């Protein structure tokens, strides 16, 4: 069965699926589209008009959570914990990863200080929750990389770039969260889950948006 991921180069949810595919060492193809000019063939197969999509020959899966759950059940090694309760807890914390990505997007796209500060306050609250949950690491559940880690990793990929412009760095007061992000960014699957010119593309997006955070490094 051919696995083909339909992607947008800056989408954190696409990145989650790429990390999952790389962790499982699967052969797959990627097709990149422009979300500002979505091709008709994409709209024909995407019920929500969003990425990622995973094409499996003639079948199509949409939504990163459904895609990753399928990949985890269909291909070894399993990334979700075997313990049912721990697995349920991991699924619940993926929602925190979703909220982190949403707040981060608001911060990156904010053009005024009021909107930026509101997003930073939301991020700080979420950092406090994550800091209280994390143990000795290096990953969310301890020594083993899990699907929940694949979901948190894209946040830290982007935060690494945002932190180059923010003063002070948002995660500086959260030692466990900082260490967790560093471990994720050092992992091969995470490092290889974005395109080679990702940083430049992301910076161009911030410039085009007139992002408030860019002014903080002047």
Image (cartoon, rainbow, N blue to C red):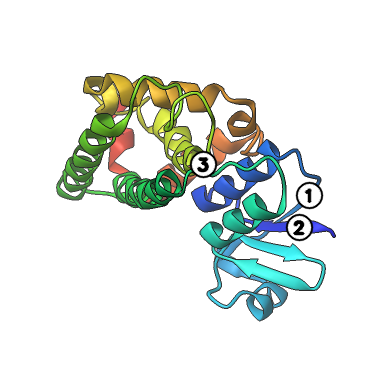
Q: Which residue is mark 3?
A: 81
User: First in sequence: mark 1 or mark 3?
Assistant: 1
Residue 4, numbered circle: 2
Q: Earlier in the sequence, mark 3 or mark 2?
A: 2
Packing grade of label 2 (10 A; few <14, some 14-19, many >=20) is some
CA gap, disc 1 and disc 2: 6 Å
Give how far across and how far down residue 17 sits, in percent.
60, 49
Residue at (40% x, 48% y) in the render: 85
In space, the residues marked 1 and 3 are separated at their CA atoms by 24 Å
Quarter of the C terminus within the rendering: top left
Task: Report how many numbered discs are placed on residues in the image.
Answer: 3
How far is mark 3 from mark 2, CA to CA? 26 Å
Question: Residue 95's x, y, as percent?
Answer: 36, 53
Identify the residue under disc 1. Answer: 28
Residue at the image position 80 percent from the left and 73 percent from the top: 58
Q: Please tell me in which quadrant of the rendered image residue 177 appears.
A: top left
Query: Is residue 138 found left or right of 96 in the rendered image?
Result: right
- Residue 218, visible in the rendered structure: no
Q: Nearer the viewer, residue 87 or 208?
A: 87
Callout 1 touching callout 2 (CB < 8 Å):
yes
Q: Position of residue 38 (x, y in %)?
A: 62, 70
Residue 59 visible in this rendered orientation of the protein: yes
Q: Residue furthest right?
A: 1
Considering the numbered disc 1 on the image, is that residue within a helix, a strand or a loop? Answer: loop
Q: Nearer the viewer, residue 103 or 70?
A: 70
């Amino acid at each position: 069965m051919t696995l083909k991921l339909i992607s947008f180069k800056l989408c954190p949810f696409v990145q989650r699926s790429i990390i999952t595919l790389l962790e499982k060492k699967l052969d797959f193809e990627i097709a990149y589209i422009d979300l500002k000019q979505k091709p008709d063939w994409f709209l024909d197969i995407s019920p929500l008009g969003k990425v990622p999509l995973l094409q499996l020959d003639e079948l199509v899966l949409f939504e990163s959570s459904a895609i990753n759950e399928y990949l985890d059940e269909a291909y070894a090694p399993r990334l979700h914990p075997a313990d049912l309760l721990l697995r349920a807890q991991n699924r619940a914390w993926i929602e925190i990863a979703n909220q982190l990505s949403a707040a981060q997007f608001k911060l990156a796209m904010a053009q005024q200080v009021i909107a930026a500060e509101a997003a930073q306050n939301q991020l700080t609250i979420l950092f406090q929750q994550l800091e209280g949950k994390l143990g000795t690491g290096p990953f969310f559940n301890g020594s083993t990389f899990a699907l929940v880690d694949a979901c948190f990793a894209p946040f830290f990929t982007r935060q690494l770039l945002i932190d180059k412009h923010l003063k002070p760095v948002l995660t500086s007061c959260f030692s466990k969260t900082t260490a967790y992000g560093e471990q994720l960014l050092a992992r091969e699957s995470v490092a290889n889950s974005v395109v080679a010119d990702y940083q430049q593309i992301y910076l161009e997006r911030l410039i085009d948006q007139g992002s408030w955070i860019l002014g903080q490094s002047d």
